[in-house]
Image (cartoon, grey):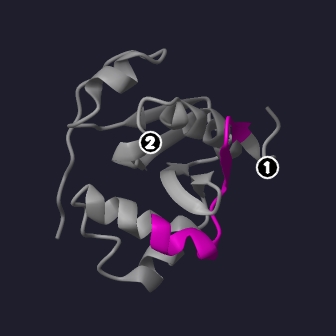
């Protein structure tokens, strides 16, 4: 798939994030009990559009039902920082479609991630498991 094109998944559209999607993305974060981004919407928009960041959304009509937020050096390494799909839309291929759409946009050859809730999902994708840590600096 060529980068920048809208991907259609049944009635879903996968596309790049725009500010109009912000409230839907923040609602997904709140549903997952991820308070960092919803606590400051202006900061969240800056994060989603920062240099080296790729943010994509899954839309059911105009409703945001999933998103993926990745950071990349643009050549080799990317990191999946956050991804969520609404509970009512899970197990429909949306998570995989988000990653398939976002990966070429990052320019990277691989994507690392940390998960504590979706091990089975990520294990279903081509991968090599690694150990890691999340450091909280503030």
Please, is residue 94 above or below residue 50 in the view?
above
The correct choice, above or below, for 94 with respect to 68 in the image is: above
Give the Cα distance between marks 1 and 2: 23 Å
Report x, y in % for residue 26. 40, 69
Can residue 75 be seen from the camera position used here?
no
Q: Which mark is residue 89?
A: 2
**Which of the two discs, 1 and 2, sits closer to the camera?**
2
Residue name at image x 38 percent, y 45 percent: 88
Element under label 1?
loop
Q: Which residues are magenta?
A: 8-24
In reply to whether residue 129 is colored magenta, the answer given is: no
N-terminal-most mark, 1 or 2? 1
Q: Residue at x 18, y 64 (%)?
A: 137
Horizontal and vertical percent for residue 25? 46, 64
Residue 18 colored in magenta in the image: yes
x then y, percent, for residue 110:
54, 29
Q: Which residue is mark 1?
A: 4
Pick whichever, 39 or 62, lies toward us: 62
> Could you tell me which quadrant the N terminus lies in?
top right
Q: Judge whether 116 appears above or below 84 on screen.
A: above
Label 2: how many residues lie within 10 Å, few (<14), some (14-19) or many (20+)? few
Callout 1: 10 Å neighbours few (<14), some, many (20+)? few
Q: Is residue 62 in sight in this rendering? A: yes
As helix, strand or loop, the secondary structure at mark 2 comes to helix
Quadrant hosting residue 136: bottom left
Residue in view at x 53 percent, y 37 percent:
94
């Amino acid at each position: 798939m060529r980068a920048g094109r809208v991907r259609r998944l049944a009635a879903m559209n996968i596309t790049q994030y725009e500010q109009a999607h912000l409230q839907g993305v923040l609602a997904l974060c709140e549903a997952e009990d991820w308070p960092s981004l919803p606590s400051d919407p202006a900061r969240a928009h800056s994060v989603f559009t920062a240099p080296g960041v790729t943010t994509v959304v899954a839309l059911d009509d105009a409703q945001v039902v999933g998103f993926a937020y990745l950071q990349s050096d643009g050549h080799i390494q990317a990191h999946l920082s956050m991804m969520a799909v609404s509970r009512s839309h899970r197990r429909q291929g949306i998570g995989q479609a988000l990653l398939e759409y976002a990966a070429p946009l990052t320019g990277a050859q691989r994507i690392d991630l940390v998960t504590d809730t979706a091990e089975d999902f990520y294990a279903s994708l081509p991968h090599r498991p690694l150990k890691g840590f999340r450091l909280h600096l503030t």
